[in-house]
Image (tube, rainbow, N blue to C red):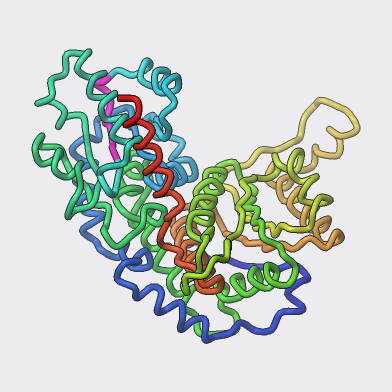
Amino acid sequence: MSLTFYFSAETEKLNPPDLKKLDSFKKIIANPKAQFFHTFEREELRITSKKVFNKFNDRKTFVHIGIGGSSLGSEMLVNALEKPTNDCKFIFINNIDPDEIYSQLNKLNPQDCLFYFVSKSGGTAETLAALAIISNFLSEKNIAQTELKNYFVFATDPKKSELLELGHKLGIELLEVPSDVGGRFCALTPVGFLPALFAGIDIDKLVEGALLGQKLCLENSDNNSLLLTADFLFKLYKEKKINQTVMMPYSSKLRSFSFWFSQLWAESLGKMKNLKGEIVHEGFTPIVAYGATDQHSQMQLFMEGPNDKCLLLIEIEKFNHDFSLKTTLSGATQDKLSPHSLSQLMKAELSGTLQALKENKRPSVHLKISRNDEVHMGMLILFFESLTSLMGEYLMVDPFDQPGVELGKIYAYDFLNQLI
């Protein structure tokens, strides 16, 4: 069980990492307002998630309602690790498109469903809008408000929240979104644990992987992968103006991981002001990709377009399943493929990409995981959360706030008020 990192030729120009940055990272994770590095250690968060799962585990459809970090981490876990034998269907209501929500609800039999509403603040407009719509939908199916406790679960801040108050009022099961963990850092909390359980995922092994990730990030040596990656990306940023980060796992199962990373990276690091209050407009632009599909689309840009991108390429060393390409069909390409397996073709595609990037002097980080399983996913999640928070230190910005998002919310409510 390991994460292995390989850097492009640019690393030949890098000095060993500054171990003082490890001390800076330790201060970051000691911040009581940013406890993503430790909160998953709280066993009661898994116990309460399992208790709710056991109460509702006869449901055939799990409807997850949230937006941004309240949904992306859960989608990532389910899409990456859902067991093939699992018979629970998942629907993610993660936007406020009326046509999409109509389509999603129109196919549901409420008796089969558990609706999981996630909002740390409990006042997220999009989530509460969906709450109103789904409550009305159930009412039309002759399900009274007093019965909602048999269909709803809320995940929200345990101290103060509109959902918390409503949950107590209606007797709805409540799970905790820890106050000391930001929404985009909450995959390894009940936000992700409950849907993971319905997907047949072992959440104890997720936590086991995150604990291994802690050791990886805190290794006090020149081989610390966290420090090496942060130094590498920062040097590219400062010396070569490479300010776009392509997350490209070679796995369809990890495609949602790219979307999760995109929010984490963009919302944490894209800031107008630095910690001194100076106007700096710092940040990296994330780009969502996955192999080998995007070799036939975006790779042309990555390979020959502006040299302003660093690719993060994730390889799975051993897939859980494989297919022989041997066939009685004939043809020039078919004959070349016939002696091989599908996983070998995937590895060949990745190897070809790495070689071509090297020849074109395009920087990359090649990360290998032994398997796509709970342990390695826990390690990956904690590593990239840690990398994001440490890059905030390098850029001298606060990776745990989002003032640009909040401003948009204010103007959205102003617009609604003008319609009254």
Is 415 on the left-hand or right-hand side of 356? left
The x, y position of residue 200, in whole percent, is 37, 42
285 above or below 32? above
Work out which quarter of the rendered image holds the C terminus and state it.
Answer: top left
The x, y position of residue 67, in whole percent, is 40, 40
Q: Nearer the viewer, residue 322 or 218?
A: 218
416 above or below 191? above
- Residue 204 is drawn in which quadrant? bottom left
The x, y position of residue 7, in whole percent, is 70, 68
Q: Is residue 115 magenta?
A: yes
Is 71 on the left-hand or right-hand side of 280? left
Q: Nearer the viewer, residue 225 or 287?
A: 287
Q: Nearer the viewer, residue 47 or 381?
A: 381
- Residue 364 is drawn in which quadrant? bottom right
Q: Is residue 356 magenta?
A: no
The structure residue drawn at horizontal position 16% and vertical position 41%, both measured from the top left corner, is 173
Q: Nearer the viewer, residue 80 or 19?
A: 19
382 above or below 297? below
The structure residue drawn at horizontal position 32% and vertical position 48%, both measured from the top left corner, is 191
Chain part drawn in magenta: 110-117
Q: How many marks?
A: 0
- Residue extending furthest toward the right: 332
Is 144 on the left-hand or right-hand side of 131? left
Is 63 on the left-hand or right-hand side of 15? left
- Residue 359 is drawn in which quadrant? bottom right
The x, y position of residue 212, in whole percent, is 44, 69
The structure residue drawn at horizontal position 41% and vertical position 79%, both measured from the top left corner, is 26
**Main secondary structure of the magenta stretch:** strand
